[in-house]
Image (cartoon, rainbow, N blue to C red):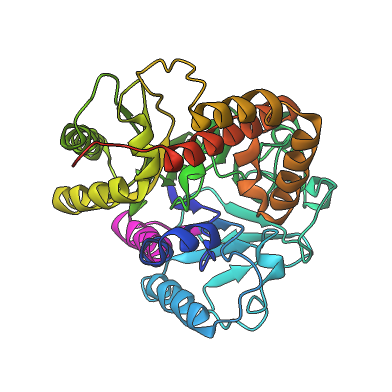
Amino acid sequence: MFRFVHTADIHLDSPLRSLALRDAKLAEFIGNATRRAFVRIIDLCLEEQADALLIAGDLYDGEQTSMKTARFLAEQLRRLHVTGIRAFIVRGNHDAMSKITKELVLPDSVKVFTGRAEAVEIDRALGGAPVVIHGLSFAQPHAPESLLGRYKPAIDEAVNIGMLHTSLGGAPGHDLYSPCTIADLTATGFRYWALGHVHKRSIVEGACAIVMPGMPQGRDINEAGPKSATVVTIDDDRSVHIENRTTSIAQFERVLVDATGIEDWRELVSAVSRALERKRTGVVSDHLVARVRIEGTTPLAWRIRRDTDLLKAEADDRASVIGACWVEKLEIVCRSAEQREEPSEDPLFELHRVIEENILASDAFQNELVGMAEEIRAQLPPESRDAFGVDEVSFREALTRLARDGAESVMARLEPTGESG
């Protein structure tokens, strides 16, 4: 039997710029959660008495300069070294940009594959089938062509395990990197392919098991849900058993609050609290990080938009009472229950009509909006670019929604209100 833990896309020290702008404390917590998730992976190797740890790329997040990260990584891998557990690492596109990749001194039991394909045989107990780990790193952050042709052929009578950082056939939010197909991987004759790069978990079982483990810790709402590592056991009969183990410290989730019919502010806050409690109960990770979406038809709509900061403070307070719960952001998409008539003396109604009919739909405004959005999108990291949509249609729809929501928020701040807390 041969057992190993397969992980990828850890992204140590990810900068979390957009999150930091909204909540520096939460950004620090998520940054530390990424490290804690890696510690949890090391713990998993020890608990499972694994023979090896396979890291299929993007251990770092980019142009890292901190040797503190290097020391942390070396310390954790040394925990495996002293128990005889080997580690195998291929560099991904983010690792290729790291300044500490070449400077890092790791234990002798750690194999970091170079840009030249290698096949490493693992010493086994008498009677066990030979196990060979195949790997290849790429020195540059781009690999537009498949790397499969560079790998050494499968070794006869051995259990061949391949490690590859690849976008496969392409995935939304991920740059093309060493593209290949499931059929290409299967044709190598390897028993298992340990992949990385795409942050969503996927498994193909059969004569060749092909696993994309996903990332061990999400970093924003676009990486929602529990995150994990994969425990793989290859029996002496070469059968493969794949298990998913949760590693995420913090779990991003969307939380829906239906404000339909709610007329009292305190009742609204209670509804937010109940929704957070329900979601927290179902989260398998240690902490919930929630993006709360408030929708529905309510007479509080204008006030919610005007006083979003106050509602966010209320939500934060309720989250702290619940415990292990954070509110990352509020999304306000509710509408007023009142149907306003057109009073000729009401300048706000006229302004709202002009915005709706003359500005939002105008070619000049749309062109300006598209230009700004494309400029912003170009500055985002690849994994965050689908926030504006994954194609032209969804891109336009997202911009229309953002423009209307922005107009409603502006009007809410101009609207007089006699409501009290």
Image coords of residue 83 (percent x, y): 36, 71
Whether residue 113 is visible to the viewer of this picture, yes or no, is no
Q: Residue furthest front?
A: 345
Please provide the residue range marked out in magenta. Answer: 32-53
Residue 51 in magenta stretch:
yes
Kindly identify the residue that appears in the image at 38 percent across and 23 percent down. Answer: 336
Q: Is residue 94 above or below residue 354?
A: below
Disc tally is: 0
Residue 134 in magenta stretch:
no
Q: Is residue 351 above or below residue 99?
A: above
Which residue is more in the foreground, 41 or 140? 140
Left or right of 117 on screen, residue 267: left
Left or right of 92 on screen, residue 184: right
Kindly identify the residue that appears in the image at 56 percent across and 63 percent down. Answer: 59
Which residue is more in the foreground, 291 or 66? 291
Q: Quadrant of residue 354?
A: top right
Kindly identify the residue that appears in the image at 43 percent across and 74 percent down. Answer: 81
Image coords of residue 392 (percent x, y): 75, 29
Image coords of residue 167 (percent x, y): 70, 42
Q: Quadrant of residue 186?
A: top right
Image coords of residue 313 (percent x, y): 27, 53
Identify the main secondary structure in magenta.
Answer: helix
Left or right of 229 on screen, residue 262: left
Q: Is residue 329 above or below residue 297?
A: below
